[in-house]
Image (cartoon, grey):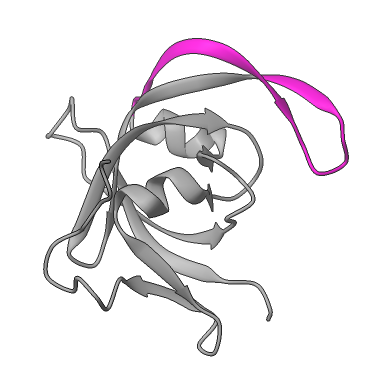
């Protein structure tokens, strides 16, 4: 399986006057949250909530801004979360994917809404 990308929209739910930004996000189920580049955080005027220490794939530690809230939209799904500001492109991890009930389609090297619940997201809460 190659790299999986998704076309998503990012928005600032606290400022409806700002237009959402359409981005191509690398999907990484090994990552937990969403990572966005600084220019996206600036365009959406996302507020820094705190700083967090992260470890990247090269095993180096970095302290980066954690901003939010950010709204993520994919097809008929949406979620609200915070984002780590790091890197040059958007990376979407497992937490927002789970929140929106998205699944990876390995054959199509894409993500899709869960075919078991195509109209509304489902969740296990037990």
**Pick the front one: 97 or 92:** 97
Whole-percent x, y for residue 12 in the image? 25, 33
Where residue 114 appears, as percent x and y from the top left, is 30, 71
The residue furthest bottom is 107
Q: Which quadrant would residue 14 be assigned to in this image?
A: top left
In the image, is residue 119 above or below residue 105? Answer: above
Magenta stretch holds residue 55 = yes
Image coordinates of residue 96 in percent, x first then y, are 39, 46
Residue shown at 53% from the left, 50% from the top = 90
Range of magenta residues: 45-63
In this picture, is 96 found above or below 84?
A: below
Tell me what residue is drawn at x 66 percent, y 40 percent: 87
Q: Is residue 118 found left or right of 5 in the rendered image?
A: left
Q: Is residue 97 magenta?
A: no
Q: Quadrant of residue 122?
A: bottom left
Please, is residue 38 above or below residue 112 in the view? above
- Residue at image location 25% in from the left, 51% down from the top: 123
* Residue 53 vs residue 11, the one in the foreground: 53
Rendered image quadrant of residue 82: top left
Please say if 10 is above or below 115: above
Give the main secondary structure, helix, strand or loop, of the magenta stretch.
strand
């Amino acid at each position: 399986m190659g790299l999986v990308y998704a076309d998503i929209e990012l928005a600032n739910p606290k400022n409806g006057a700002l237009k959402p930004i359409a981005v191509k996000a690398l999907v990484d189920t090994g990552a937990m949250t969403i990572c966005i580049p600084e220019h996206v955080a600036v365009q959406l005027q996302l507020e820094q909530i705190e700083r967090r220490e992260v470890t990247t794939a090269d095993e180096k530690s970095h302290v980066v801004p954690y901003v939010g809230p950010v709204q993520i939209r994919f097809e008929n799904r949406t979620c609200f979360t915070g984002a780590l500001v790091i890197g040059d492109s958007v990376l979407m991890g497992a937490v927002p994917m789970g929140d929106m009930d998205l699944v990876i389609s390995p054959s199509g090297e894409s993500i899709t809404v869960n075919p078991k619940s195509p109209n509304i997201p489902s969740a296990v809460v037990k």
